[in-house]
Image (cartoon, rainbow, N blue to C red):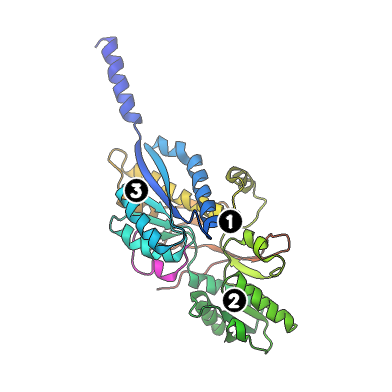
Amino acid sequence: MNTRVWMLLSLAWWSSATALETVQVCVMAPLSGPQSPSGRSVWRGVQVALEERRSELNRVGLSVRLCNFDDQGDPATGAANARRLLAQRTIAVIGPLSSGAALVVAPILRSANVAMLTPTATAVSLTGQGWRHVFRWAPRDDVIGVAGALYLANEVKARRVLIVDADGGSATAEAAERTLRSRAVVVRRASVGTILSESFDAVYVAGDLNVAAQVKRTLQERGSKATILLDWLNDADLFNTSFGSSLVGTLFMSWEVPPSENARLRALMSKLGNVPSKGKALVGYEAANAMIFALRDARRLNPQGTLTPEEVRSALAKVRLTTLLNENVSFDARGDRASISMYVRRLEANGQAPVVFSLPAPTTPSP
């Protein structure tokens, strides 16, 4: 074989061996509208995760094209976007962020078996319907409620708790009440406008910041020093711009990565830049890494053929990774995290929300 032929054959082999398959992964999030601070922050977190892992994916023969669809937190817009991304042969989805959008999008993606990993949707029913393609990074509402109740019963030592369920039927409030009663805690319920005058050790609030502010104002007028615990808080690092000092001292449940002197976190925050919500950016980053690991693992199992949505879904179901805070992550048969730490955080006058207590969330209850 002459030198020219040998070189041409070698070049052809090298080109074939290093050819990358391009797959599309889409983020569905509110990039405009009232919920856009969360959506834009998650989007930035996903971008940074892919930037860090791009060469690793290239080494296994994958090139990921990242796209985003703005659902504005609206289920109807989310449904339209889901159909569009399927038409573009998207292989996996990160999002949607809201439970309402996620519950509408999931059946549409199911038709093509496209894996969907929501960073923040907490509705119990999302992973209670036997959908094998749905996964979530956040805990379920009932898990959040149980964790909050355990904190009030075991750490605050509350013996009398008032539950304020702003909209009625909150899954967090229902789970909190069941857990408190199982520990012989006296529980009463009231609406925001009819808070009972009797004395309580703690008030569990299922609602938003506005509801919590009303509860705190009422308790202050009555001279009550009861602990106020908000079931969970979205975008904790934004509260100060909207509510000033009216909620200082209020506690809330969170699963977002808390402030830390962890060197790895400091370096990552520098990469993320000036995002509206650091907590949501970190959640997006962590969820994206889970999806990236699934893509990598799926390609390793199928190094030559075209990657399919089912292969990615199957790999995500089996993925194992370690978070920024050294938590081991895997998903159970429903698509929920097998374990997840919860944090009790306190709102402070400077807009910060330090952790006052951490606890592992209980095992996800059966649907």
Task: Tell me which secondary structure the magenta stretch mostly adopts.
Answer: loop
Q: Is residue 43 left or right of residue 86?
A: right
137 or 167, nearer to the observer:
167
Question: Residue 295 appears at what percent x and percent y?
Answer: 39, 46
Q: Is residue 360 above or below residue 82?
A: below
Q: Is residue 125 magenta?
A: yes
Looking at the rendered structure, the kind of residue marked 1 is Gly
Q: Residues within 10 Å of mark 1 (few under 14, many from 20)?
A: many
Stretch of the chain drawn in magenta: 121-134
Q: Earlier in the sequence, mark 2 or mark 1?
A: 2
Q: Which residue is mark 3?
A: 90
Image location of residue 51, percent across then percent down: 50, 40
Q: Would you say residue 167 sits in the magenta stretch?
A: no
Q: Residue furthest top?
A: 2
Disc 1 and disc 3 in contact, CB within 8 angstroms: no
**Picture coordinates of residue 212 (x, y %)?**
63, 74
Q: Mark 1: which secondary structure?
A: helix
Mark 2 residue type: Val
The earlier-in-sequence mark between 2 and 3 is 3
Mark 1 → mark 3, Cα distance in angstroms: 27 Å
Left or right, residue 199 beside residue 112: right
Instruction: Quadrant for residue 37, please give it.
Output: bottom right
Q: Which residue is mark 2?
A: 205
- Residue at 29% of width from left, 38% of height from top? 304
Residue visible at 54% across and 79% down in the picture: 179
Q: Residues within 10 Å of mark 3 (few under 14, many from 20)?
A: many
Q: Which residue is mark 1?
A: 279
Label 2 and label 3: CA atoms lie apart by 40 Å
Question: Could you tell me which residue is drawn at 61 percent across and 72 percent down?
Answer: 210
Between 31 and 141, the one nearer to me in the picture: 31
Residue 268 appears in the rendering? yes
